[in-house]
Image: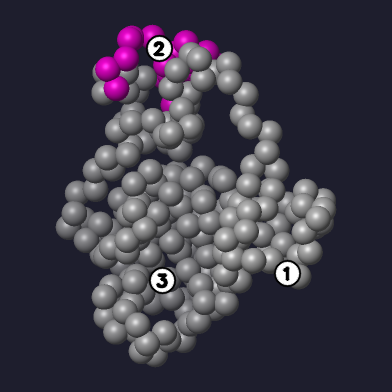
Amino acid sequence: MIYPFEEEKTITQKFGQGDAAITGGIHKGLDLAANSGTPIRAVAAGTVVGCGYNSSAGNYVVIDTGDINVGYYHLSQRLVGYGQVVAEGQHIGLVGSTGWSTGPHLHLSFERGGVAIDPLPYISGQVQYSDPAAMKPNSDGYYTIRQNDTFWGLEERWGIQHGTLQQANPELDPRQLQIGQRIRTSAAQSATPTPAEQYYTIQQGDTFWALEEGWQLSHGTLQQLNPGQDPRTLQIGQRIRIK
């Protein structure tokens, strides 16, 4: 993993400290002070699984790295959209002070299995990050390319026959793999169509308008996909169709 900024920033609140100024609880992230508009880098490659606005986090982006969900909160602007695959080091947003914030900063959040962990050892290099989930395909039969991956190395790692990944991905040149690129992990998967419908679970602060903006959908798309749903009465935990 890498540091989220080009230059080291001042820590204004550490993970695990009392958070009386805002919530009265324990601080479940790491706050790094920076000027509004400062570009924020993805600390690791992954897929955007959360992107929008709510009253506490403000503008936020959450990226699933395959092992840790990394949250970037209080942004002035989001630069990526829901479902987008991002590379390590890619700019995903700009520093701001939206939501429950007392000044411009990045609140960096790490969660593994739904449990908050301290980001600092990972982004400072104290912990050598080795993503166990990156060692095997995702549950949907796809894998996201990481730095130094090769078809031969993945086949050896997963114990599959040489040439399997080329057969499953005939459109790809194995000499030109890109970090963040998704590949099929079996020839059978290459013949399986992607499900036509996709769904999202409503979280606190969500609105149709904010979700459409976060996912870069045209206005009215979610209402068209969910004709029986009144957008004024969304319920936390409710599933809506997004595609």
Identify the residue position indicated by label 3 in the image. 107
Q: Position of residue 180 (x, y in %)?
A: 45, 38
Please name whichever residue, 93 or 169, is drawn nearer the observer in this view of the structure.
Answer: 169
- How many angstroms separate mark 2 from mark 1 (CA)? 49 Å
Q: Position of residue 35 (x, y in %)?
A: 46, 76
Q: As rendered, which of 140 and 175 lies closer to the eye?
A: 140
Q: Is residue 13 visible?
A: no
Residue 31 is drawn in which quadrant?
bottom left
Expressed as whole percent of the image width and height from the top left, the position of residue 109 reads 38, 65
Tell me, yes or no, if residue 212 can be seen here. Answer: yes
Q: Which mark is residue 233?
A: 1
Q: Is residue 215 left or right of residue 169?
A: right
Viewport quadrant of the C terminus: top right
Closer to the chain start, of discs 2 and 3, is 3
Q: In the picture shown, does residue 150 fall above or below 64?
A: above
Q: Residue at x 25, y 57 (%)?
A: 122
Q: Nearer the viewer, mark 2 or mark 3?
A: 2
Q: Is residue 163 magenta?
A: yes
Q: Element at badge 2?
A: helix
Q: Which amino acid lies under the numbered mark 1 shown in the image of this protein?
A: Thr
Spatial CA span between label 3 and label 1: 30 Å
| Horizontal side of residue 83 vs 104, given as left or right | right
